[in-house]
Image: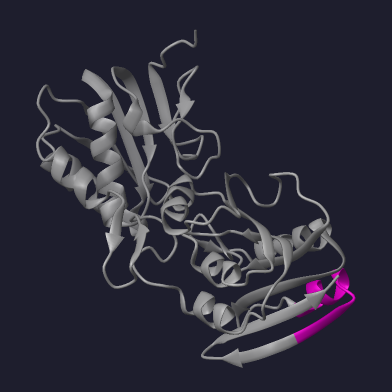
Amino acid sequence: MAETPTAAVYGLPPRELAEIPAGAVQVSPLKPGAKDLETLSNLTELIVYAPPGALERRQVLAAGLRALAPGGRLLALAPKDKGGSRLGKELAAFGCDVDETARRHHRICAALRPAAPAGLEKALTEGAPRLVPSTGLWSQPGVFSWDRIDPGSVLLAAHLPPLAGDGADLGCGIGVLAHAVLASPKVTALTLVDIDRRAVEAARRNVDDPRADFHWADALEDPPLAGLDFVVMNPPFHDAGHEDRGLGQAFIRRAAKILRPGGRLYAVANRHLPYEAGLKAAFKAVHTVIEQSGYKVFEAIR
């Protein structure tokens, strides 16, 4: 029987700002295989590298306080311009007595879990999964484009040809592209992969099709795929809030690796991102399908 964890860490706080307790389990939904913070209890210590979105951040803090035993230690930190300046007030609103310091452009808040924290249920509800009326899809604060359909995905979905065979949606999000792909009866299987557990859980609810298979994984590594007929993707180009053009290039190389000869990639990107060279290096033929409203859609043949 696995031991019950007594310490946990959410995200990857800078080592010079937070010492991770020995044996601490990872609880971030962006770390495939991590524990779900909302399933833990009686923790003695929790370190949270708080996310920037207000609803997401308060939900994480509330879940953390609920998971801690009374008197358990919470250390929460974030860059001051990405939610850190609000951390102290948010923890105080939950009834915590906060010791706040500043270091290396971060705010660092230490607190002990009060016997009866205030307002946890409200924060948990506001950050919970929900059916978004404007999109008609399940989503959750913190997921990419959580309360609207990303216009790049809309453009790609509108310009996908009828697909056939086995394919993958790398970085599937909540399943927007999957709907367009599975509209074709000749598609036999679609593997949806995303690094965000919350997105994958939403996609399971949004995509009710026996041909769909869902994976909480790093799309650049897992699951092992090969010989696919097609890949669709709206690749990410931010990591930890900073633009990372290499991330999209890595998605392009991954797509080329898992496609069969003659297999096709359909991808969308912001117009300013320089993906053309990487596409031409990895694929036999590359065609720009459309450029519109700040986005470009590519078709590439392996």
In this picture, residue 283 sits left or right of residue 38: right
Q: Give the residue drawn at x 27%, y 56%.
A: 54
Residue 52 lies, with reference to residue 44, above or below; the image says: below
Closer to the camera in the image, 133 or 103: 133
Write the residue at 50% across / 62% down: 175
Q: In the displayed structure, would residue 16 be above or below residue 207?
A: above
Residue 150 figure quarter = bottom left
Where on the picture, by quarter, is residue 83? bottom left
Residue 65 location, x and y as percent? 24, 31
Q: How is the image coloured?
A: one colour
* Residue farthest to the front, as pictured: 185
Q: On the picture, is 48 further left or further right than 15?
A: left
Figure label count: 0
Q: Quadrant of residue 247?
A: bottom right
Q: Quadrant of the C terminus?
A: bottom right
> What stretch of residues is rendered in magenta?
276-287
Give the percent coordinates (x, y) of residue 49.
Answer: 40, 41
Q: Is residue 101 visible?
A: no
Q: Is residue 122 magenta?
A: no
Where residue 297 appears, as percent x and y from the top left, is 65, 82
Q: Which residue occupies 43% across, 58% down?
A: 206
Q: State left or right for residue 112 relative to residue 165.
A: left
Q: What residue is at 15 percent from the left and 40 percent from the top?
A: 121
As rendered, which of 289 and 41 lies closer to the eye? 289
Residue 277 is situated, as x and y percent measured from the top left of the image, at 81, 77
Residue sitting nearer the eye, 218 or 86: 218
